[in-house]
Amino acid sequence: MRIVDKRKEHTVDFRCLSAGQVFYYPEEEWYGIRLATETDAGENAVDLADGGLATIGELDQVIEVNAQLEILN
């Protein structure tokens, strides 16, 4: 996947994101997407680079990303 970064450096609380919203997590330097519901283990996001589940604190600061998936083949 090719990532082109055109975001603005404005952070928001993770709790402000809607389900399916893509974000950048500057504390750990990765891109993710918010899940609609938490898993039984409490994960609420997916790391877009490796597909791993993650738990982000509701007050953790993230940067909303207006993302686009580009299918090349």
Image: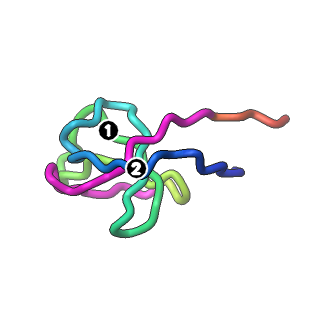
Residues at marks 1 and 2, CA–CA distance in whole angstroms = 7 Å
Q: Please give the name of the residue rendered at 29% of the width and 30% of the height, measured from the top-left corner.
A: 18
Q: Residues within 10 Å of mark 1 (few under 14, many from 20)?
A: some
Q: Is residue 62 left or right of residue 68?
A: left
Q: Along the line of sight, which residue is nearer the eye, 26 or 45? A: 26
Q: Is residue 49 left or right of residue 11?
A: right
In reply to whether residue 55 is colored magenta, the answer given is: yes
Element under disc 2? strand
Q: Which mark is residue 35?
A: 1
Q: Is residue 61 left or right of residue 5?
A: left
The three-letter amino acid code for the residue at tag 1 is Leu
Image quadrant assignment for residue 36: top left
The three-letter amino acid code for the residue at tag 2 is Val
Q: Along the line of sight, which residue is nearer the eye, 21 or 54? A: 21
Q: Please give the name of the residue rendered at 33% of the width and 68% of the height, measured from the top-left corner.
A: 27
Residue 51 percent location from the top left of the image: 49, 53
**In the rendered structure, which segment of residues is drawn in magenta?**
52-68
Q: Which mark is residue 46?
A: 2
Whichever of callouts 1 and 2 sits on the residue coming sooner in the sequence is 1
Colouring convention used in this rendered image of the protein: rainbow
Q: Along the line of sight, which residue is nearer the eye, 9 or 13? A: 9
In reply to whether residue 70 is colored magenta, the answer given is: no
Residue 30 percent location from the top left of the image: 46, 61
Number of numbered markers: 2
Quadrant containing the C terminus is top right
Q: Which mark is residue 69?
A: none
Element under disc 1? loop
Disc 1 vs disc 2: Cβ atoms closer than 8 Å?
yes
Residue 37 percent location from the top left of the image: 23, 35
